[in-house]
Image: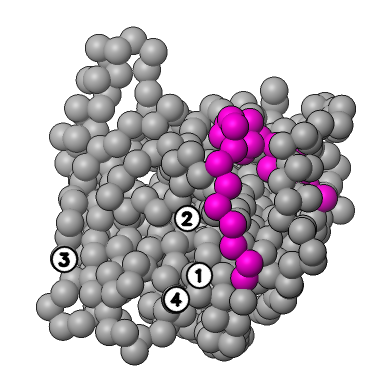
């Protein structure tokens, strides 16, 4: 049983800053921040989970079955991630490209200390609490004085795993697959990386978050591995018997001039290629959700609506379904993973072609980070617009990609990748 307490900070923003700084003492940290974005599916403004009481680490072979067992056994809050490569345990696929990060395929932990921030209140839940531990921690958080931290980067020289020339060659190979009818659409990604480099993870995350202020920002730490995410995309959420997925397909840059910015947004609304990309993935998500949905319950709540973020305009759709109370939450995720927005149509063929053409193992990029509640609800983002860091190996990585269809222009696709990479580069170079 968890000990609970409701707390009202004097200054919520200061509390949020301090609690994340205070959390750095732990080897396991998950910080989820909505940056005050509100929609009908919002649950919390921010969440912090720290200090593993129990945990599970596994590879793709038994990834989802082990997760199902772990979630059923704990019947508590668990936080963690799913890498893209869990696909290999579901289908006859492989992941043999270069991997400089070395994240295990799946990791979840049951936090001893949990902070759920909503409005001007913080719900605190502790496991195995010692004496007045909550009071002592709150006092430490409210009076936390951050140590002097160097913001300097060591040897940070960002390179591309795939050269521009090779990118165009690979994209033309992808288009050949599409013209032959092997696939209709595929998400093709490339890695930016820096070797022999060190960064300050928290300071880099704060910079990245301030640049983008996305609805699914994440700071993740597990010992020496970090994810600093400015994700705008929700992968999947379950609330009681309702499941929603919100794929993003369609991106346009922002402009400082308001009239030009409005034109860019309207152009995206009317872009036939971007809409067709989005609609194809919506159909894929509808099919994925149907595997666990009650008959006739899958519906598109929102189609191709354009939302504006600080860096880009994005085209987002919302697909919903209803599930039986007997359906295990892990089975819902397993039947839809990896998310359609990061794979393609048909899904298995697209993933096979992606593996052949990409130069880096995706790992946690285009996977998901999130949590399960004790009641079996869950919420997961898509790990995009994210910096991944292995501190022991001094390896920094971020990847970007885009949906390739028969109407894709290789030069425009390359420029879209650079647009998506801008925030990560800026955060690393500041």
In the picture, measured across the screen, residue 202 lies left or right of residue 229, that is right
Residue 375, position in %: x, y? 44, 76
Q: Which residue is mark 4?
A: 375
Q: Mark 2 or 4 closer to N-term?
A: 4
Q: Nearer the viewer, mark 2 or mark 4?
A: 4
Secondary element under disc 2, as helix, strand or loop, is: loop
- Which residue is at a point 38% across and 27% down the rendered structure image? 253
Q: Which residue is mark 2?
A: 382
Q: Is residue 25 visible?
A: yes
- Which residue is at a point 56% across and 34% down the rendered structure image? 12
Residue 74, position in %: x, y? 60, 82
Q: Mark 3 or 2 closer to N-term?
A: 3
Q: Quadrant of residue 309?
A: top left
Q: Farthest residue toward the left?
A: 296
| Magenta-tinted stretch | 2-25
- Determine crowd level at label 2: few under 14, some 14-19, many 20+ residues with C-alpha closer than 10 A: many
Q: Mark 1 or 2 closer to N-term?
A: 1
Q: CA distance from mark 1 to mark 2?
A: 15 Å
Residue 372 got which mark? 1
Residue 144 got which mark? none
């Amino acid at each position: 049983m968890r000990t609970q307490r409701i707390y009202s900070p004097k200054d919520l923003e200061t509390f949020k800053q301090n609690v994340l700084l205070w959390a750095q003492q732990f080897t396991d940290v998950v910080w989820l921040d909505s940056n005050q974005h509100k929609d009908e599916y919002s649950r919390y403004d921010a969440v912090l989970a720290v200090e593993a009481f129990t945990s599970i680490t596994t590879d793709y072979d038994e990834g989802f079955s082990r997760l199902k067992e772990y979630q059923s056994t704990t019947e508590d809050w668990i936080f963690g991630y799913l890498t893209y490569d869990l696909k290999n345990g579901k289908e006859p696929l492989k992941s043999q490209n270069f991997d400089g990060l070395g994240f295990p395929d799946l990791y979840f932990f049951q936090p001893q200390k949990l902070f759920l921030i909503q409005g001007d209140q913080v719900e605190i839940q502790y496991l195995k609490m010692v004496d007045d531990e909550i009071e002592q921690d709150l006092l430490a958080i409210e009076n936390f004085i951050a140590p002097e931290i160097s913001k300097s980067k060591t040897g940070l020289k960002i390179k591309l795993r795939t050269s521009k020339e090779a990118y165009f060659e690979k994209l033309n190979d992808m288009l050949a697959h599409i013209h032959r009818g092997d696939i209709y659409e595929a998400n093709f990604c490339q890695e930016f990386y820096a070797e022999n480099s060190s960064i300050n993870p928290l300071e880099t995350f704060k910079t990245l978050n301030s640049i983008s202020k996305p609805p699914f920002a994440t700071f993740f730490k597990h010992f020496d591995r970090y994810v600093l995410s400015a994700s705008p995309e929700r992968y999947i959420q379950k609330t009681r018997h309702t499941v929603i997925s919100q794929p993003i397909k369609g991106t346009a840059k922002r402009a400082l001039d308001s009239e030009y910015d409005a034109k860019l947004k309207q152009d995206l609304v009317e872009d036939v290629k971007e809409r067709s990309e989005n609609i194809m993935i919506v159909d894929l998500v509808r099919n994925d959700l149907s595997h666990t949905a009650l008959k006739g319950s899958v519906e598109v709540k929102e189609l191709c609506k354009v939302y504006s973020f600080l860096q880009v305009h994005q085209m987002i759709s919302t697909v919903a379904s209803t599930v039986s109370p007997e359906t295990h939450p892990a089975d819902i995720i397993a039947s839809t993973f990896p998310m359609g927005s990061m794979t393609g149509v048909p899904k298995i063929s697209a993933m096979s072609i992606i593996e052949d053409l990409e130069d880096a193992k995706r790992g946690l990029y285009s996977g998901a980070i999130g949590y399960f509640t004790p009641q079996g609800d869950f919420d997961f983002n898509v790990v995009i617009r994210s910096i991944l860091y292995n501190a022991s190996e001094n390896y920094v990585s971020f990847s970007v990609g885009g949906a390739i269809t028969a109407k894709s222009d290789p030069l425009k696709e390359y420029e879209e990748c650079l647009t998506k990479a801008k925030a990560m580069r800026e955060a690393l170079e500041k």
